[in-house]
Amino acid sequence: MPDDGRLCGLSGKKRSMKDTCHLYTDLAWLWPMWGDAATEYAHYCQYVTGLIRQYSARETITLLDIGCGGGKNVLNLKREFQVTGLDLSPAMLAQAKELNPGCTFVEGDMRTCRLGRTFDAVLMDDAISHMNCRADFAAALRTAHAHLNPGGVLIVTPDVTLETFQQNKTTTSSATRDGMDVVFVENVYDPDPADEQYETTILYLMRKQGRLRIETEHWTMGIFGLDVWRRVLRETGFEVHEGRYHPGDDAYTVFACVKTE
C-alpha cells in the first residue's frame, strides 16, 4: 500500500543502493493506476472512520491526512469529514487536488510541519513507514500530536512491524490506462535484522503499443517492534488502542491514539 510521506533519507549504515523517489516525482503519473480509489481505499477508510467514531472523546468534524499522497484516502474520507491533506511531493499534491477539488492541500514535511491550526482527527497511513530512523519516526508522531485537538484521535497504520515483516515478500499488480499497460512488482527485504530499517524495491514494467520501458525504485523504510510503537506513542502523549485491519489475505496493525494532553 504505498503512499508518500517521504523522505527520511539514509540513516545509520550505508546501503548498497541509492534511494530514489520516482513514484513521487517523474513517475507520479503511475500512481492513479496503482489501486482503485473508489474500491480498495474505500474499505480502509470505512475502517478508519469506525475507529475514529469509537474512540474520539469529541465531535469529529475536521481531519488532517498526513502523507496524503495522490488523495485516494481523501476521496473517501471527505464524505465524513472536512479533510486537509499534507504531503511533501508537489507532483502527488497536484493529483490530490485534481481528484478532490473541494479540499485543502498543503506541501510540508511530516517531521517538521506546523500548520498553525488543529483538527479533530489525524490520519497517518503507510507514509509513516518512510520514517527510517527512530528520531524521524518520533518527530512525525509529534507532528500528528501537535495538530490534534484534545480528545481527538490519531489513526496510524504502519506497512509492517517487526512482528509482521515477511522477508523477501514479493507482490505484483497490473493496470491499463490510455493504451499503457503497467505491471508493478514490489519486493521487501531486510539485509540486517539488527537495525530498524528494511528495503523496498519496485519494478515498473510499462508497455505502450508493445514497446517495453523498465524503471526501478528503491526505498529505505523504517521497521519498529510493537513495544517501540506503544512506548513512543505514549511518550508523545497518546492513549493507545490497537486493532487489526484485514484486507484480503494481508493484515495490518492499526493504532487508534487519543490525545490526552
Image: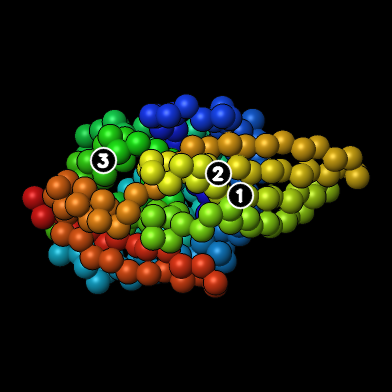
Looking at numbered disc 2 in the image, what kind of residue is underneath it? Answer: Thr
Name the N-terminal-most of marks 2 and 3. Answer: 3
Most foreground residue, 134 or 50:
134
Residue 246 at x, y percent in the picture = 46, 71
Q: Disc 3 marks which residue?
A: 138
Image colouring: rainbow
Query: Which dot, 2 or 3, sits closer to the camera?
Result: 2
Residue 213 at x, y percent in the picture = 81, 37
At mark 2, the secondary structure is: strand
As drawn, 49 above or below 96: below
At mark 1, the secondary structure is: strand
Most foreground residue, 204 or 55:
204
User: Is residue 238 found left or right of 225 in the rendered image?
Assistant: left
Q: Disc 2 marks which residue?
A: 200
The reply to whether residue 206 is visible in this rendering is yes
Kindly indicate whether the residue at mark 3 contacts the one at mark 1 (C-beta within 8 angstroms).
no
Q: Specify the label residue 187 is tagged with.
A: 1
